[in-house]
Amino acid sequence: MAQDLLNLAVDLFLTVVRTRMQNQRKGAMEIIQKEEYGITCLKIKGRMDMAVAIETEKAVDRILKGNNNRLLFDLGELEYLSSYGLRIILKAAKKIKMMDGKIILCSLLETDKEFFDICGFGANIPIADSVESGIKVLS
Protein backbone atom coordinates (compact mmCIF):
# COMPACT_ATOMS: atom_id res chain seq x y z
CA MET A 1 0.00 0.00 0.00
CA ALA A 2 2.75 2.50 0.95
CA GLN A 3 4.72 1.50 -2.14
CA ASP A 4 1.65 2.07 -4.32
CA LEU A 5 1.19 5.56 -2.88
CA LEU A 6 4.86 6.33 -3.43
CA ASN A 7 4.67 5.14 -7.05
CA LEU A 8 1.53 7.22 -7.59
CA ALA A 9 3.21 10.33 -6.14
CA VAL A 10 6.28 9.84 -8.36
CA ASP A 11 4.09 9.36 -11.44
CA LEU A 12 2.13 12.51 -10.61
CA PHE A 13 5.33 14.51 -10.07
CA LEU A 14 6.80 13.34 -13.38
CA THR A 15 3.56 14.20 -15.20
CA VAL A 16 3.63 17.73 -13.77
CA VAL A 17 7.30 18.17 -14.76
CA ARG A 18 6.67 16.89 -18.31
CA THR A 19 3.64 19.16 -18.71
CA ARG A 20 5.59 22.22 -17.57
CA MET A 21 8.44 21.42 -19.96
CA GLN A 22 6.01 21.02 -22.87
CA ASN A 23 4.31 24.32 -22.01
CA GLN A 24 7.67 26.09 -21.87
CA ARG A 25 8.58 24.76 -25.32
CA LYS A 26 5.21 25.86 -26.70
CA GLY A 27 5.80 29.39 -25.43
CA ALA A 28 9.34 29.67 -26.77
CA MET A 29 10.05 32.93 -28.52
CA GLU A 30 10.83 33.19 -32.20
CA ILE A 31 12.21 36.27 -33.98
CA ILE A 32 11.70 36.66 -37.72
CA GLN A 33 13.54 39.51 -39.38
CA LYS A 34 12.87 40.76 -42.89
CA GLU A 35 13.32 43.92 -44.92
CA GLU A 36 10.41 45.58 -46.72
CA TYR A 37 10.71 48.88 -48.57
CA GLY A 38 13.89 49.73 -46.65
CA ILE A 39 12.18 49.05 -43.32
CA THR A 40 13.46 46.39 -40.94
CA CYS A 41 10.53 44.32 -39.69
CA LEU A 42 10.91 42.21 -36.55
CA LYS A 43 8.10 39.72 -35.99
CA ILE A 44 8.17 38.39 -32.46
CA LYS A 45 6.23 35.22 -31.69
CA GLY A 46 5.71 33.66 -28.28
CA ARG A 47 6.85 34.93 -24.91
CA MET A 48 9.40 37.73 -24.58
CA ASP A 49 10.37 37.13 -20.99
CA MET A 50 13.71 37.70 -19.27
CA ALA A 51 15.04 34.31 -20.33
CA VAL A 52 14.78 35.01 -24.06
CA ALA A 53 14.48 38.79 -24.33
CA ILE A 54 18.27 39.05 -24.58
CA GLU A 55 18.00 37.47 -28.07
CA THR A 56 15.68 40.29 -29.09
CA GLU A 57 18.01 42.89 -27.63
CA LYS A 58 20.93 41.48 -29.63
CA ALA A 59 18.87 41.46 -32.83
CA VAL A 60 17.79 45.07 -32.29
CA ASP A 61 21.38 46.14 -31.50
CA ARG A 62 22.61 44.50 -34.73
CA ILE A 63 19.93 46.28 -36.71
CA LEU A 64 20.68 49.67 -35.20
CA LYS A 65 24.43 49.33 -35.74
CA GLY A 66 23.79 49.26 -39.47
CA ASN A 67 22.23 52.01 -41.52
CA ASN A 68 18.73 50.95 -40.52
CA ASN A 69 16.82 53.77 -38.89
CA ARG A 70 13.30 52.52 -39.58
CA LEU A 71 12.16 49.65 -37.38
CA LEU A 72 8.79 47.92 -37.26
CA PHE A 73 7.90 45.53 -34.44
CA ASP A 74 5.17 43.08 -35.47
CA LEU A 75 3.75 41.96 -32.11
CA GLY A 76 0.61 40.24 -33.37
CA GLU A 77 1.75 36.84 -32.12
CA LEU A 78 3.40 38.04 -28.93
CA GLU A 79 1.96 36.05 -26.03
CA TYR A 80 3.75 37.79 -23.16
CA LEU A 81 5.94 40.88 -22.76
CA SER A 82 8.04 41.15 -19.61
CA SER A 83 9.32 44.43 -18.20
CA TYR A 84 12.72 43.54 -19.69
CA GLY A 85 11.12 43.11 -23.11
CA LEU A 86 9.42 46.48 -22.69
CA ARG A 87 12.80 47.99 -21.80
CA ILE A 88 14.25 46.67 -25.08
CA ILE A 89 11.47 48.33 -27.10
CA LEU A 90 11.84 51.65 -25.26
CA LYS A 91 15.64 51.56 -25.62
CA ALA A 92 15.29 50.88 -29.37
CA ALA A 93 12.85 53.79 -29.70
CA LYS A 94 15.31 56.11 -27.94
CA LYS A 95 18.22 55.03 -30.17
CA ILE A 96 16.19 55.36 -33.36
CA LYS A 97 15.01 58.86 -32.42
CA MET A 98 18.65 59.84 -31.84
CA MET A 99 19.36 58.60 -35.39
CA ASP A 100 16.46 60.71 -36.75
CA GLY A 101 14.69 57.47 -37.58
CA LYS A 102 11.23 56.05 -36.98
CA ILE A 103 9.85 53.11 -35.03
CA ILE A 104 6.37 51.63 -34.91
CA LEU A 105 4.64 48.81 -33.05
CA CYS A 106 2.10 46.82 -35.05
CA SER A 107 -0.72 44.36 -34.50
CA LEU A 108 -0.79 44.62 -30.70
CA LEU A 109 -3.52 42.85 -28.80
CA GLU A 110 -6.09 45.29 -27.45
CA THR A 111 -4.89 44.78 -23.85
CA ASP A 112 -1.27 45.46 -24.85
CA LYS A 113 -2.31 48.56 -26.80
CA GLU A 114 -4.24 49.77 -23.77
CA PHE A 115 -1.19 49.18 -21.56
CA PHE A 116 1.02 51.28 -23.86
CA ASP A 117 -1.56 54.06 -23.88
CA ILE A 118 -2.12 54.09 -20.11
CA CYS A 119 1.62 54.19 -19.42
CA GLY A 120 2.11 56.99 -21.94
CA PHE A 121 4.36 54.96 -24.22
CA GLY A 122 1.84 55.27 -27.04
CA ALA A 123 2.55 59.02 -27.15
CA ASN A 124 6.24 58.36 -27.89
CA ILE A 125 6.01 55.19 -29.95
CA PRO A 126 3.37 55.05 -32.69
CA ILE A 127 1.10 52.02 -32.77
CA ALA A 128 -0.50 50.70 -35.96
CA ASP A 129 -3.32 48.19 -36.25
CA SER A 130 -1.53 46.15 -38.92
CA VAL A 131 1.90 45.64 -40.44
CA GLU A 132 0.65 47.12 -43.71
CA SER A 133 -0.48 50.34 -42.03
CA GLY A 134 2.79 50.44 -40.06
CA ILE A 135 4.80 50.24 -43.28
CA LYS A 136 2.77 53.13 -44.71
CA VAL A 137 3.57 55.24 -41.64
CA LEU A 138 7.29 54.51 -41.90
CA SER A 139 7.48 54.97 -45.71
Image: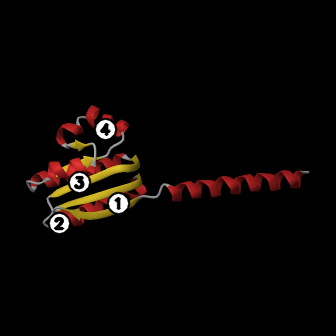
Q: Nearer the viewer, mark 1 or mark 4?
A: 4
Disc 3 residue type (three-letter): Leu
The answer to whether one can see residue 113 in this image is yes
Secondary structure of the residue carrying numbered label 3 = strand
Secondary structure of the residue carrying numbered label 4 = helix
Residues packed near mark 4 inside 10 Å, few (<14), some (14 to 19) or many (20 plus): some
Residue 36 in percent (x, y) is at 21, 62
Residue 91 in percent (x, y) is at 22, 51
At a point 32% along the width and 57% down the height, the residue shown is 43
**Residues marked 1 and 2 touching at CB (< 8 Å):** no
Q: Earlier in the sequence, mark 3 or mark 2?
A: 2
**Residues marked 4 and 2 touching at CB (< 8 Å):** no
Number of on-image labels: 4
Q: CA distance from mark 3 to mark 2?
A: 16 Å
Determine the image quadrant of residue 115: top left
Q: Which mark is residue 65?
A: 2
Disc 1 residue type (three-letter): Ile
Q: Which mark is residue 5?
A: none
Q: Which mark is residue 72?
A: 3
Taking the image as shown, residue 63 lies to the left or right of residue 44, namely left
Determine the image quadrant of residue 7: bottom right
